[in-house]
Image (tube, grey):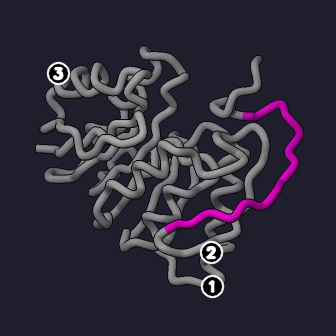
Amino acid sequence: MSDHYFSAQPASADERRRVTVRLAGLDLELETAAGTFSAGHLDLGTQVLLRSVPDPTGHVLDLGCGWGPIAIEAALRGASRVTAVDVNERALDLTRRNADRVRAAHRLAPIDAVTADRVDPDTRFDTIWSNPPIRIGKDALHALLATWLPRLAPGGVAYLVVQRNLGADSLATWIAAQGWGEVDRAASAKGFRVVRVTAR
C-alpha cells in the first residue's frame, strides 16, 4: 500500500522532529513525523482556516487532525472539549503528545485524539474545524463528510478549508444539496475557500 498521510499505519520511518508553529497567538514547539500531513510545517490551508474562524464554542471536532495544530488551537481558544479524529495512528500519537506538551505550560481544554470508531455515535458537536483530506478522492470525501456533518448540534457550525482549484466551490454545492444546513463562504484567501455549514 502506498504510504499516504491517510494510511492507518504509515510505512515510512517514524522519525520525530520538532517544528515551531504559531497557534492562538503563541509560539509553540511541537513534534511531527514523516507519514503525517504537512509534517514539516503548518500548511497554508490550515493557516487560512485558523485566521478565518471565530473562537469555537462547546465541543469541537477536528476532522483529520494530523499532528494536532487545529485541535490545539481550538483547545487554546475556548473549546470546552476537542475530539480529534484521524485514521493515521502515528498522527493520533503526535496529537496526544503535542497536547500534553502544550498543557504543561498553558491552560488547554481536554483533547481526545482517536480513530472514528472510538467516538460515541450519539455525540453531537457544537463546532467542526477541518482541513479535510481532499486527496482521498471525491467518493471517500463525500462519505466522510456525510458521516460527520450531520452530527453538528442544532445551530452548530462547521468550517472546512479547501483549495479553490481542488473543487472547493463544487464541494460547497454538494454539501448544500444534502440539506444538512445553510452553506456559505466564510473566507477566501491564498487560493483557498473556507466553507461554512450552519446546522439547522
**Percent coordinates x, y for residue 164 in the rendering:** 38, 27
Task: Give the residue displayed 65% in from the left and 82% down from the top.
Answer: 104
> Crowding near pointer 2: few (<14 within 10 Å), some, many (20+)?
some
- Which quadrant of the structure image shows residue 177? top left
**Relative to residue 171, is residue 154 depicted above or below?**
below
The mark found on residue 102 in the picture is 2
Instruction: Please name the residue that numbered disc 3 is placed on.
Output: 177
Under mark 1, the amino acid is Ala
Q: Is residue 82 left or right of residue 99?
A: left
Instruction: Please name the residue that numbered disc 1 is placed on.
Output: 105
Task: Give the residue displayed 19% in from the left and 24% down from the top.
Answer: 178
Q: Are marks 1 and 2 in contact (CB under 8 Å)?
A: yes
What segment carries the magenta color? 9-23
> Crowding near pointer 3: few (<14 within 10 Å), some, many (20+)?
few
Task: Give the residue displayed 76% in from the left and 26% down from the top.
Answer: 3
The mark found on residue 59 in the picture is none
Q: Secondary structure at mark 2?
A: helix
Under mark 3, the amino acid is Ala
**Percent coordinates x, y for residue 122 in the rendering:** 32, 48
Task: Give the residue displayed 47% in from the left and 70% down from the top.
Answer: 24
